[in-house]
């Protein structure tokens, strides 16, 4: 009975499809009018259910009757002795290195990248569902991170599948080398036969390179026809790949196209915190916020800025305060200019603006509640964020050393008791200091 069912299926499937998709396929059991098939690969299981459901259903009905049913289970097992070599080996095969930090867990999701993230995750969980997946966006927005996250996820969760991550430049160089050495067949075997998931980065590098585009076109077709997952990244959308073959562009568009938008400020702050976590470092919250607010052209530069601050902290043994961060990151900040200023003079102006208390009144002996609060906020920020000495603060605010100490303590105690209004004023002062430092 088992052989009759298998033979019935084989007559309904062409030879290439049989060798490709049914090499690890077998009848596990026949219970009454129900057939349980088994395969050694979850990807193949889902593909058979999706593409060959009617074929399998008709085959079991022919052998067992019109009320016959079936199901496919996933098990790692040796295929039927009469079959060809299984499509994939029963062990994790990573054909190229991946960055272990590039995982879905380390990818911070925000409004601008949510769609691309979930598309990539779906592809990783169910290869072949969206095929190809084409991800595009500007420099440093996380394309490579998502691409390698797919690879890392598959290696961890689907060890039967073989994963290859390459840049288009690597694909080009491999093609050129294989042609020079007369090993073109080996090249095609490597990219078309030995891969289950192909991840191609920076495909825009192939603009104008007609020969390698032709090779990529045929590689794409063979992989796609075999149900193998293809994911492509580019700095622009498919239709804007000038000097690309139309037939190749149309292949890129036949699956799912997802765009990565620049992250908003809140997402950048979350990304900065995640980068700090990955680097096992610590920076004050106001410094991290300053970096996220002002290094906003791309995430690579954001990481570079954080690394610079951490290296400075490690090599000098000093804590990085806001004043130090502004000076250290002048080459990272978009304006590329940092204003030379007397920190406390600038601070007093900012406090006056935020609280609505004139500078003269802050520096006077007035005991008015608003003036007193503004003065204490200024001293607290000068001490804890600008890291000014008590002596300097006393001189700038026309106060004695003990008064400064007492003022700073009162603000600290009030914050510890949860004074949200006071905290909001202090946060606004710190934010304004950062913005002013970049002007001029």
Image (cartoon, rainbow, N blue to C red):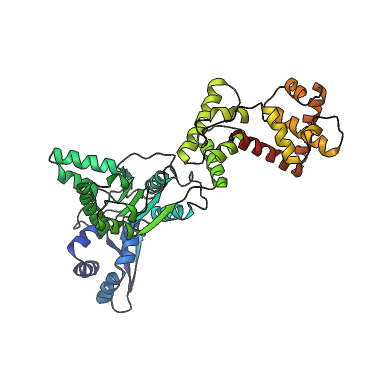
Residue 426 drawn above or below residue 383: below
Q: Nearer the viewer, residue 417 or 291?
A: 291
Q: Residue furthest bottom?
A: 66
Q: Where is residue 280 in the image (x, y as percent from the top left)?
A: 53, 33
Q: Residue 23: tell me if it is visible.
A: no
Quadrant position of residue 10: bottom left
Q: Position of residue 398 (x, y in %)?
A: 80, 24
Quadrant position of residue 345: top right
Residue 426 drawn above or below residue 224: above
Q: In which quarter of the image is the N terminus?
A: bottom left
Q: Residue 89: tell me if it is visible.
A: yes
Number of callouts:
0
Q: In which quarter of the image is the C terminus?
A: top right
Q: Which of 17 and 97 is in front in this view?
A: 97
Quadrant position of residue 134: bottom left
Residue displayed at 22% across by 47% down: 212
Q: Which residue lies furthest to the front in this view?
A: 440
Q: Where is residue 64 in the image (x, y as percent from the top left)?
A: 28, 75
Residue displayed at 71% across by 34% down: 349
Residue 219 drawn above or below residue 37: above
On screen, residue 221 versus residue 376, left or right, reads left
Q: Where is residue 427 in the image (x, y as percent from the top left)?
A: 68, 40
On screen, residue 91 versus residue 173, left or right, reads right
Q: Residue furthest right?
A: 367
């Amino acid at each position: 009975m088992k052989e009759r069912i298998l033979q019935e299926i084989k007559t309904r499937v062409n030879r290439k499809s049989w060798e490709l998709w049914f090499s690890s396929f077998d009848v596990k059991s026949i219970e009454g009018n129900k057939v349980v098939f088994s395969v050694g690969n979850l990807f193949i299981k889902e593909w058979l259910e999706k593409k060959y459901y009617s074929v399998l259903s008709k085959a079991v009905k022919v052998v067992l009757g019109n009320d016959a049913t079936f199901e496919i289970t996933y098990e790692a097992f040796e295929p039927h002795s009469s079959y060809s070599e299984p499509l994939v080996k029963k062990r994790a095969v990573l054909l190229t290195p991946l960055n272990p930090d590039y995982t879905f867990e380390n990818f911070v999701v925000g409004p601008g990248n949510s769609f691309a993230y979930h598309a990539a995750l779906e592809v990783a969980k169910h290869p072949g569902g969206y095929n190809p997946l084409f991800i595009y966006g500007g420099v440093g927005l996380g394309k490579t991170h998502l691409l390698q996250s797919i690879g890392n996820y598959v290696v961890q969760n689907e060890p039967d599948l073989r994963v290859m991550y390459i840049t288009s430049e690597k694909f080009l160089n491999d093609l050129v080398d294989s042609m020079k050495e007369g090993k073109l067949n080996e090249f095609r075997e490597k990219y078309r036969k030995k891969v289950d998931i192909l991840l191609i980065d920076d495909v825009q590098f192939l603009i104008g390179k007609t020969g390698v585009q032709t090779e990529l076109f045929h590689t794409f077709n063979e992989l796609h026809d075999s149900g193998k997952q293809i994911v492509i990244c580019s700095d622009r959308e498919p239709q804007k790949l000038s000097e690309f073959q139309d037939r190749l562009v149309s292949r890129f568009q036949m699956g799912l196209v997802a765009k990565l938008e620049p992250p908003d400020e809140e997402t950048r702050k979350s990304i900065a915190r995640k980068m700090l976590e990955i680097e096992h470092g610590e920076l004050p919250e106001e410094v991290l916020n300053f970096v996220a607010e002002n290094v906003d052209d791309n995430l690579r530069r954001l990481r570079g800025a954080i690394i610079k601050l951490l290296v400075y902290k490690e090599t000098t043994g000093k804590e990085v305060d806001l004043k130090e961060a502004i000076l250290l990151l002048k080459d990272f900040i978009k304006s590329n200019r940092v204003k030379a200023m007397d920190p406390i003079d600038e601070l007093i102006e900012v406090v006056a603006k935020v609280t609505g208390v004139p500078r003269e009144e802050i520096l006077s002996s007035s005991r008015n509640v608003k003036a007193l609060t503004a003065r204490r906020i200024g001293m607290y920020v000068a001490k804890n964020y600008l890291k000014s000495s008590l002596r300097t603060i006393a001189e700038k605010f026309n106060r004695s050393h003990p008064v400064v100490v007492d003022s700073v303590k009162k603000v600290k105690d009030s914050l510890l008791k949860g004074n949200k209004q006071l905290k909001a004023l202090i946060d606004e002062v710190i934010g304004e200091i950062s913005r002013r430092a970049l002007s001029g």
